[in-house]
Amino acid sequence: MKRRDFIKTGTAGTAMFSAFPVIRSKKSYRLVLIGSGWWGNNILTEAIASGQTSLVGICDVDQKALTATQEHVKSITNDRPSSFTDYRECLQQTKPEIVIVATPDHWHALCAIEAIQSGAHVYLEKPISHTIEEGKAILKAARSNDRIVQVGTHRRVSPHNVSGLTFLRSGMVGKVSAVKCFVNYGQGPGKVVPDAEVPEGLDWDMWLGPAPYRKYNPRIHPRGFRQFLDYANGTIGDWGIHWFDQVLWWSEETHPRKVFSSGGRFVKEDHSDAPDTQLAIFEFEEFVLHWEHKLCAPNANESANVGCYFYGSKGTFHMGWRDGWTFYPKAKGHAPIKQAASLNDPDGQNIKELWSNFLSCIESKTLPICDIETGYHASNMSLLAMISYRTGRSIEWNGSEVLADPEAAALMRRPYRAPWVYPEV
Ligand SMILES: NC(=O)c1ccc[n+]([C@@H]2O[C@H](COP(=O)([O-])OP(=O)(O)OC[C@H]3O[C@@H](n4cnc5c(N)ncnc54)[C@H](O)[C@@H]3O)[C@@H](O)[C@H]2O)c1
């Protein structure tokens, strides 16, 4: 069989998909983890628990993260993986069949493409890329190498999100003309943390990789990179993509046709540079979507602090996270209808279910539920909003190109720091 014939793509392939297909055989896959921080370990734990992996390599640029993961692996499996600080060397030496990419966002494209080209199927964390053209390159690499790429948007397999989708599609909510996706966290202004000596065992130059050089700062690594625009895209890039993906899933749309975003740093006093307050409007054919991210204090009038409100002619439906979903009917005297969440510990996720879908799709050679193309479209919504935020203008988008605005279109990519080369489509 030619590799490009591996996946049954197109309508037939996707139509065969079911959220929890049965795994028929018990093949064990040679597994590598690239980025062994917080989330990488959450994925790794579920991958090992599936009983279908043999961990052959762990790669991180921070020795502390590598050591912690080695200890964790030792406590739950007999695997004795080699450890690496350069993902290219790791892939060459271990020849994995599956690679998990859970680095900070600015590394996703290079690591994922190298893994795909080495012949591995990839479980890639969201957002799939830091700029839009990187996402296109990952999608192209996945398709032309016939590899399965599952994106970590686990809400598509979360039981309450699945039943919520069925409820939304049942007509009980009526005609939905507007959706609001939001994240409100009552964090304070923060404070400036001085740059510091690079901690022992951390290869800071390799952590920065294709991003511009800057001195090490403990606020950036580990985990703090989200609020620094050289490595990520703030809260809309981190959290927004989860909820945008839910809206694309529900609407079966691939992209908005117009995007406008505004916001600023009105609260934060630290030296991160992502907006602490951001609004965005996305115009679709049949509805309008509104994103809102605020650092306001929690308040009784807005009991949910994350999720999507679907505003329908028969009531309002809230798709949440830890609080499950709730439908508030318009009809007087009708009590709200609720569905509790069913999430896995730690951190309230459904990685186990997503991993199971990933393995079954590798086996059946069909596209997974969070296929790279869905991750590409959902990630692009955050990235387009950030282009609008930066330019101060509405962005017209046809699903692939920014229209009639060369300055905005140029922000679909960014220069890479040498020797790293921007992945070409
Ligand atoms: N799907 C979800 O719900 C979910 C939840 C949390 C995080 N994430 C995603 O997971 C990714 C990682 O987030 P995190 O919170 O675990 O961050 P983290 O800082 O805890 O971990 C990232 C690790 O990657 C390492 N790294 C950096 N450059 C590397 C390179 N070139 N090669 C190998 N390792 C490298 C860092 O040293 C660090 O240990 C992010 O993209 C984030 O958006 C997804």
Image (tube, grey):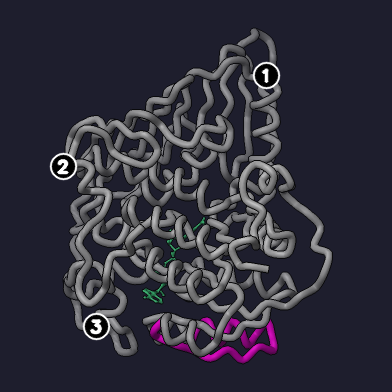
Mark 2 lies within 8 Å of ligand 1 (Cβ measured): no
> Does the magenta run of residues contain 395?
no
Badge 2 amino acid = Glu
Badge 1 amino acid = Gly
Q: Earlier in the sequence, mark 1 or mark 2?
A: 1
Percent x, y of residue 392: 18, 35
Mark 1 Cα shell of 10 Å, populated few (<14), some (14-19), many (≥20): few
Residue found at x 37% / y 49%:
237
Q: CA distance from mark 3 to mark 1?
A: 56 Å
Q: Is residue 178 above or below residue 140?
A: above
Mark 3 Cα shell of 10 Å, populated few (<14), some (14-19), many (≥20): some
User: Between 51 and 322, which is closer to the camera in this rendering?
Assistant: 51
Percent x, y of residue 40: 51, 70
Percent x, y of residue 304: 50, 35
> Does the magenta run of residues contain 74?
yes
Which residue is denoted by mark 3 in the rendering? 198
Q: How many marks?
A: 3
Mark 1 lies within 8 Å of ligand 1 (Cβ measured): no
Q: Quadrant of the N terminus?
A: bottom right
- Magenta stretch bounds: 67-86
> Contact (CB < 8 A) between labels 1 and 2?
no
Q: CA distance from mark 1 to mark 2?
A: 42 Å
Give residue 407's mark: 2
Residue found at x 49% / y 40%:
243
Residue found at x 63% / y 30%:
326
Hey, which quadrant is residue 88 in on the image? bottom left
Label 1 residue SS: loop
Label 3 residue SS: loop
Q: Is residue 312 above or below residue 130?
A: above
User: Is 333 placed left or right of 109 in the picture?
Assistant: right
Q: CA distance from mark 2 to mark 3?
A: 36 Å
Give residue 171's mark: 1
